[in-house]
Structure formats: structure tokens, C-alpha cells
Image (cartoon, helix red, strand yellow):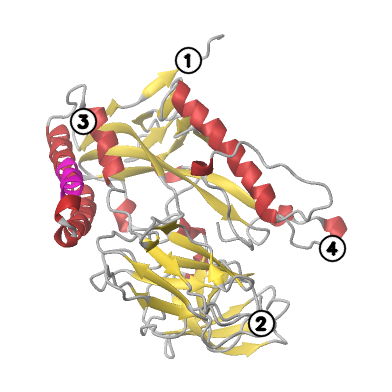
Amino acid sequence: MNGDFARVTFDSAARFSRVLLQQGRILLEADFNEQSAIHHHFLRSLIVDLIGRHWRAGDSFTLAVDPQGTADFSISAGHFYLDGILCENDSACSYATQPWPYFPDAEHEPPTAGGLAYLECWERHVSALQYPGLREVALGGIDTASRAQIVWQVRVASQPWVDAHLALVLGALQLRLAIAKPEDRPPIQLVIDHVTNTQTAFTNALANFPGAAGDCATAGDLLDALDAARPLMRARAVHDATEDDPCSLSADAAFRSRENQLYRIEVHDSGLADGHATIKWSRENASVVFAIRGAPKLDVESNSISVSLESLGHDHRTGLCEGQWVELTGDAFEFTPVAPPLGQVSKIDRTRQTIVIQLQQKTTVDFAHCTLLKRWDQHDGVNAAGVLQVEEHNSPIWLPLERGVEVQFRVGGYYRTGDYWLVPARVASRDVGWPQTAGGPAAIPPHGVQRHRAALAYFKRDAADGWEFGRCGCSMLPLCP
């Protein structure tokens, strides 16, 4: 969630049951948001404990041959519960016309042979820039609360796709194993063996379609294996014990700022820490976003883009300056694993509310799909594309962001575009809010995006017989028809 939040406080391990307001106290947005998170955690856990992680209501989300006779397949209407999250398909659709479609991308075309169709859902942040109906006209259309939205997609996993992704997962796990202490190696090796066995079982299931009774369990293991090597990050800011004056900031103080911040460290390019994975960061949780007016205009000769914006922000904190890195984004990038194009602001016309963005690399992106401009704040150490290369260390080597805030990525992670960590930094403590262990700051997986997956069906497709499906998953019928 990249809203304008001070911090995100929900922690399921704390076992809080509700938020209790007290008289005469200030109400923070974090308290309200935590109450909502507690409620959703309870409700979704109850659904999973009573019925299971993945199940459909009746014949919902059943795949079949497209009645229109196209090369596509149909998806029936109804409800599917994925880890307790309700996915709603209001009307029957096809793979190509589902409510949250893929944008043109060769990786996501319906495969020509066989594979696994699965459902993936997640929560995304929606602001008034994307959904103008959130603004209250009676208040002058000011920006108030934003929303969390459940989105889902039916996706397909072919054998080459699975092999490519699991190769990255296994590569990351092998790196962990190589640097682990002898006593820490057995559990890592167990994970490697499980992923390898799952990959072999999936290959056999596709070869033996329609397969055996246990093939659906194999499909579930396969989808879980995609997250077997989530990256781990630590964050810190060390106090200067000699600085006691609250009206001044020592040059030795770790967090040297006069404003509280919520840093967001987000993966830009997917891959391993071998020169492929990159990150970007924002001191405002990437909440400084601008609506694009009309289609951006690309100047091929100078490789620059002219963009008209609805607003240039209200102040320095929410505005733009020349030299800053920005990305052109929108649903086209949120619904595909493609990193949005980054560029550097080279010119600002505040009268016409237009800016010129200098791209550092040639791109084939269709800028007509770009509806939002998002500001990022990385500056020192960026490469030619404006991002930071991921470097992993288990030694005392840290990556400085700014104002004393530092992060460290532990060895053996598979980084995916859009994954992020949140680091609240506070002036009063001159520190960051980060979980601690006996050895210092804890290494934790990304705070998001939490993606949930469930197998829908194995399928086979050939020119003679068309589509053939082997459905996976449980179905629940109402107690009272």
C-alpha cells in the first residue's frame, strides 16, 4: 500500500483483538487502519480454519471451452475464496476478457500446448487519482481516505514458465545453503529438495494428463514453491548517545532529519542479486503521485517524454523538482510483472503544468497505458537507469539511503517487481522502527505485495480436440438451496 501513511502497525504475532480509543487522545490514521487489519485477519483466518485455504462456491471459476468457438477458454461467474479472501467474478468471461485483464505481453498469451491454470489475487492501493468518485464534491474535492481493492487474475503456467521461475528460486536457495553455518544447512536443504521434487512431480502430472488424484496437491505445492526464496532485508539507524539536545541534530546522529518519514524500498527489476535485481526507494512511501492528462508524447530523437499533469503538487514535499527520478505507470504495469519505465525530470513548466522526462534507455513501452506519474527519491549510487543494484551481504556491509538510514539484503533472495519493505523513521528517537533480534535488526521478508494463488485446472490443448480440462480444488454448496 503506497498511501500517505505515517506507519503500518498491524502485527498478527501481537495477538491484538481490537483497537481501544481513549478519551482526550489524538487519533492517528495508523490506529484506524490497524483496527481494519485486525478485523480482516480474524475473518479470513476463520474462513480458512473452517473450510480451507482454497475453495469455490458451487461451480464458480470453472474453466471450459469458450462457447464462442475461439482459441480462448471461458471462466464461469461466481465466488472463489483464496486464503479467506473473496474473489468475485460477476459474469462469465474468457481468459482474454476477464475483469482484470493482462495487457499485451507475449508471456501471458494462452499457451498452445498444456499447463496449469491458476487463480492469483492480491490487495492493491487505490487513491482518488485512480477512482475520482472517492472525492467529496461538497468539500471541494479534496483528497481524503483511499481504499484497498481486491483484484484477481486467472493465469496460466506452462512447463517452460515453471522451469524458468523455479530455476531462480533454486538458485537463490543454493546461495543461502553455500554461506549457511553447518547447523543451519539441513532446513535449507529440505526446502531445496521439496522444490526439486515438486518440479519433477509437476512435470509428470503434465505428461500424464488427465493424471492421478494427487496431481492437484502437486499443483498447490508448485504455486507455494514460487515463494520459497523470498528476499530478506534489514534496516537500521544507530543513535549518537552524546546528542541530547532535541533542538539540534548531530552530524553523527543516524537519522538526520527534521521530518518523520516512512521509507519504502521497492523492487524494480526482478531476478537474483547477480546484476539483474534492482531497487528504488521513496521517503514518502511512494505516495507522491500525479495524474497524467492526455497521452505522454515521446520524442524519439532525444529519447524524452513530454507529460501534462493535472497538478504539480502543493509544496516541496508533494511536488517535483528537476533532477528527480519518476516513473510512468498505471494498471498496465500493476497487472503484469513488468517494471515501469523510469526517467529523470529535465524541465518543468509550472504555468502549463507540463514536465519533460529524459529516459536513460530506449524502450518499447506503449505510453498510452501510462496514467500516473510517481516520484522516487533515490539519488546517490544509482545506475544509468536510475535504480540501485541489489547487493547481498551477510557481513557488516550496509547500503546507505539517506540521512543515516541504511538497509542490508541477506544472501539468497529471489526479488520480484513490486515487492516492498516499509521503514518508519522518527525524529524523536533518531531511529527507525524495525524488529530486533539478539544479533541486531531482524532480516524479514517483504511487507508486500502478498500474492495468494490456487490451482484451478490442468489443461491440454491441441489442434484436433481443442481444450481439455482436469479441474482442481474443492467446491462448497449452500446449506439451504
CA distance for labels 4 and 1: 48 Å
Circle 4 sits on which residue? 140
Circle 2 sits on which residue? 245
In primary-sequence order, the first of circles 4 and 3 is 4
Do tag 4 and tag 2 residues touch (Cβ < 8 Å)? no
The amino acid marked with disc number 3 is Asp
Of residues 402 and 196, which is closer to you in this image?
Answer: 402
CA distance for labels 3 and 2: 78 Å
The amino acid marked with disc number 2 is Asp
Does the magenta run of residues contain 338? no
Question: Can you tell which mark lies on residue 465?
Answer: 3
Per the rendered image, the range of residues in magenta is 185-194
Q: Is residue 5 left or right of residue 390?
A: right
Residue at (21%, 21%) from the top-left corner? 213
- Marks 3 and 2: which is nearer the front? 2
Question: Can you tell which mark lies on residue 477?
Answer: 1
The local crowd at label 3, few if under 14, some if 14 to 19, many if 20 or more residues have their Cα within 10 Å, is few
Residue 460 visible in rendering: yes
